[in-house]
Amino acid sequence: MPSALILGASSDMALAIARTFGAGGYDLILCGRKVSRLAPMQSDLEIRFGVRAFLAEFDAEDPGSHQAFYDSLGQRPDVAICVMGFMPGEKPAEQDWKTVERTILVNYTGAVSILNLIAADFASIGKGTIVGISSVAGLRGRQSNYIYGSAKAGFLTYLSGLRNRLYPMGIHVVTVLPGFVRTRMTENLPLPPLLTAEPAEVGKAVFQAVKQKKNLIYVRWFWRWIMLLIRLIPESRFKKMKL
Amino acid sequence: MKKKIANWGNYPVVISEEQSFTLEEEARASLEGMDSVIGRGNGRCYGDASLGDTTFGTLKFDKVLSFDRGQGIFTCESGITLDQILKIIVPSGWFLPVTPGTKFITVGGAVASDVHGKNHHVDGAFSNHVVSMDILVASGKVLTCSGSLLPDLFEATCGGMGLTGLILRVSFRLKKIESSYIRQKQIKATNLDHVLSLFEQYRHYTYSVAWIDCLKKGNHFGRSILILGEHATRSELSPSQTRDPLKLPRQTQFVFPFTMPSFVLNPITVKAFNFLVYNKNFMPEMDSVVSYEPFFYPLDSFLHWNRAYGKAGFVQYQFVLPFESKTALIEIMTKISDQGMGSFLTVLKTFGPQQSIISFPMEGYTLAMDFPVRRGLFAFLDQLDRIVLEHGGRIYLSKDARMSPEVFWNSYRDADRFMEIVRRYNPEYKFRSMQSDRLLLTKI
């Protein structure tokens, strides 16, 4: 049976992705902090889909532990999906360096650290797929969300370079820009319903993208055009806007 | 974030803060900072039972915890819907012990409303099959209860509309099946007496329910179609059904695309609809083997069918009367027919005995019907309430949006005892709903 590694398994998006891969017959390795909390998710996946699910302790914020973490898995996944993310709360992140640092660590540094190891391992056998969940916030910096956005932008660029490097070795990299998703992370934001995807849609989109070897996907199609328009606004105009 | 919510009847609509959670620790942390809250699953109760200033949305708390395929014991978190459970258990040869007419309700809701199905006269209500449950009570503790462990909490939680606390986990017994098909028998009854005698004659059937035409007068007053069913054995299946006896039904879904203007529903359209339903069965008796989906959930294939009742919404009125009060049943049906207030789907069924302090079912006849909200409706329903009350009956809280506290306290005879238990676990009424406030259950 193929297997999928989920980094940052406790989010709503991660659960939806895990369920889609479980339904597709994948064994699952669920990784996160205080992972024993995810025992209900483990039984859920095993009973619903008749697959095996494993729990592995993983701390995205501690890159020094990543090699030991990856070695301890005892198996090589076919697909590695990096879902973890941290979006700072209402208080502007820039006022608090700890929050800024954590935003960069979870969304960029930690992600790069673990995916570097996985990429090297996949490269050694010439097989595997890596999926990174970035964000449309990474396509242009807005005053309301640019610390998070810039970390996701860094991750976006990293994924693009990684795809380029691994292509000759037969390893595929998928970049996902989900747009708004109805999750606990966005529960208290007023999101426009038409632009907001359910976590299950993200799960399906990621699974399809892996099957069809897509390079970069948006979940709801109009996000591609919205972001194109936003990127076309001249900087002289953009800097005056309240976004 | 505050948003507008309503339950299935689209009446009433309120502004509420919905708090969802994925892990038990999140629910416990949120509870600490709350003054008042009520659990809310998929919002399929009809009235104001799961509405309040703050609600605990359980839909993300939906994990399957264990499934003993040998013994048929299923344990899950409370936010999973029956729809999802069926997809897991049916292929293994198990079925829900009790199911209401929609599969889009959560397990937590099934317990809080103590739902009944077409098999109540044989198998009792949902609570009859619950092995144990975990409840988050007002103090922040999670308590496990069952028939023998904290039996007071267990009893007051079944049918208790969420007032004892938030139902977190439920373990319940399933029903063994040989196939996913139902051997169905439909019998046309020419009037009310006829259908009541048929209920009696066929009471050994596991599943029974009657669709009844509420507008017909004279000799055909109460004409109906009695629908009976048993889980089909393998030998009763057709050759094509035998190939995959535990097959899951295909999901065909039609989405009701818009909210229909209220005037579309009037005595003429309802009469025409009833004529079609009654006369689509040519033969007085019809036997068939059908998938469980159309048998149990005929309306589930119409997503948002509640939109057919217009923007003002509707209320579903369901009461139960003891068997000896047949005259009251006739009186109520006559009033509905005279007023031309008949609903599209009026459903009649018999309940078996049930011992409980707050659950709705009791031995007798139960009638359920939908009424679009319009001027004069509530005064009319108050008249019906009086008849129900005089004859020792009561009204289903999960459907209710408008009953008066007097009617409630006089018809639910053990309400005092129920509230005594509620106060043990919810002393400051942290768990309270619009309904419990309206019925003066949680007014301090």
Image (spheres, rainbow, N blue to C red):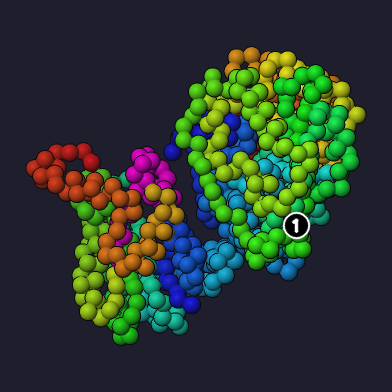
Camera-nearest residue between B117 and B211: B211
Q: Quick check: is A179 in the magenta stretch?
A: yes
Residue A72: where, in percent of width, then height?
44, 81
Residue A19: where, in percent of width, then height?
49, 62
- Pointer 1 local density, CA inside 10 Å: few below 14, some 14–19, many at least 20: many
Vertical comparison of B34 with B329: above or below: below
Residue A84: where, in percent of width, then height?
37, 62
- The residue where tag 1 is placed is B232
User: Which quadrant holds residue B116?
Assistant: top right
Camera-nearest residue between B66 and B19: B66
Left or right of A126: which side holds B374? right
Residue B74: where, in percent of width, then height?
68, 60
User: Which quadrant holds residue B319?
Assistant: top right
Vertical comparison of A102 with B158: above or below: below
Q: Residue at x 60, y 55 (%)?
A: B249
Q: Quick check: is B433 in the magenta stretch?
A: no
Q: Mark 1 lies on which chain?
A: B
* Residue B188 visible from this viewpoint: yes
User: Which quadrant holds residue B132?
Assistant: bottom right
Q: Which residue is drawn at 38% across and 41% down?
A: A193
* Residue B139 visible from this viewpoint: no
Q: What stretch is highlighted in magenta?
A: A174-196
Left or right of B439: which side holds A122? left
Q: Which residue is drawn at 61% across and 40% down?
A: B299
Q: What amino acid is found at the position of numbered circle 1 in the picture?
A: Ala
